[in-house]
Image (cartoon, grey):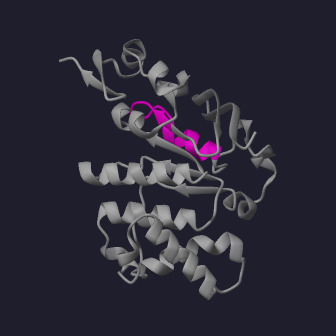
Amino acid sequence: MSGIEAIELCFSYGNTMIIRQATFELQDGEILSILGPNGCGKTTLLKCINMLLKPEGKVLVDTIDLRTLNARDLAMLMGYVPQMHSPGFPYKVIDVVVSGRTPRLGFSVPSEKDYEIAGNALNRVGVSHLADKFYTQLSGGELKLVLIARALVQEPKVLLLDEPTSHLDFKNRIIVLKILREIADDGIAVIMSEHDPNLASLVSDKVLLMRSKGDIIGYGNPKEILTPDNIVKVYGLNIEIFERGGSRYIFPIF
C-alpha cells in the first residue's frame, strides 16, 4: 500500500489508557480528520503516529515500520505541525521555513537550492510576501501557514497537523483547509485533528471519531461515520443533518 497504515495503536500514561486499538489506513492524496471532544486523546494519537510517543502496535508508511527509523529518517517521511508554537526569536520567515530542510541537510549549511525550495513552499501556501517579515510579527493565520510551509520543505510522504484551524477566524479556517486539500491532491497523505465535524466533512476523505479515554467510535467515510447516533455518543448532542449541493451540514438541536 502506498500511504500510511496504523495497526492496533494503544497508549497509556501510567494506568490510564489514552488510546485504545486505533487502526486506520490512508492512501497518498487522502485526508483523514481525527474528531472528538477535548481531552479524548487526539493529540496523543498524532504523537503516537509520529513516534514522539512510543505506542503499542505499529505504524507503516509505504510498508516501512516507523519503529525501525531514527529521527532523521522519520522526519524525511513525516512532517508535523503542532497545535501551538510560540515564536521565540525574531528570525525571518524564510529562515524559519528553510529550517525544515534540516533532516535532509544534516550538518550542511542551507544552499541556494534549499532557499528556493523554501520560497516555493511559502508560495504554495499563499504567503510568499511574508518571506522577509520577522516570524515574531505574524498573525495567528499567517503563523499556521508558515508552519505548514516549514513542514512541506521536509518533502514528507505524510503531513500531520494538530488542530490546524484552532484560534483562527472563519475566513482563515477555510483558507487553511483549502490549502490542505490542495496539498493532499498533490499526493501527500494528510492527517489532522479537528473539533468541528462540519469543517472536517468539507475536505476529508475519511474520519476517525473518538470519545473519552481514546475509545474509537467509528472510522471511514464521513457520511457513514458522522451520524446522529455517533454524534450523541461522542458529544452528547442531538443534531440534524442537512444536505445541499453534495455537502452535508450538521446542526445541533437546542
Residue 46 in magenta stretch: yes
Q: Is residue 75 above or below residue 159?
A: below
* Rendered location of residue 245, percent (x, y): 32, 29
Q: Is residue 163 above or below residue 121?
A: above
Q: Is residue 169 visible?
A: no
At 79% from the left edge and 45% from the top edge, which residue is drawn?
A: 65
Residue 245 in magenta stretch: no
Quadrant where the N terminus is found in the figure = top right
Instruction: From the viewer's side, name the closer residue of 33 and 74.
Output: 33
* Rendered location of residue 101, percent (x, y): 62, 73
Specify whether 30 is left or right of 66: left
Question: Furthest-left residue in view?
Answer: 254
Q: Is residue 88 above or below residue 209?
A: below
At 34% from the left edge and 54% from the top edge, which residue is drawn?
A: 175
At 56% from the left edge and 82% from the top edge, which residue is drawn?
A: 115
Question: Furthest-top residue in view?
Answer: 229
- Where, by quadrant of the figure, is residue 133 drawn? bottom left
* Rendered location of residue 100, percent (x, y): 58, 70
- Magenta-highlighted residues: 33-49
Tag count:
0
- Where, by quadrant of the figure, is residue 104 drawn? bottom right
Specify whether 205 is left or right of 254: right
Quadrant where the C terminus is found in the figure = top left
At 45% from the left edge and 71% from the top edge, which residue is drawn?
A: 122
* Rendered location of residue 70, percent (x, y): 77, 59
Q: Is residue 9 visible?
A: yes
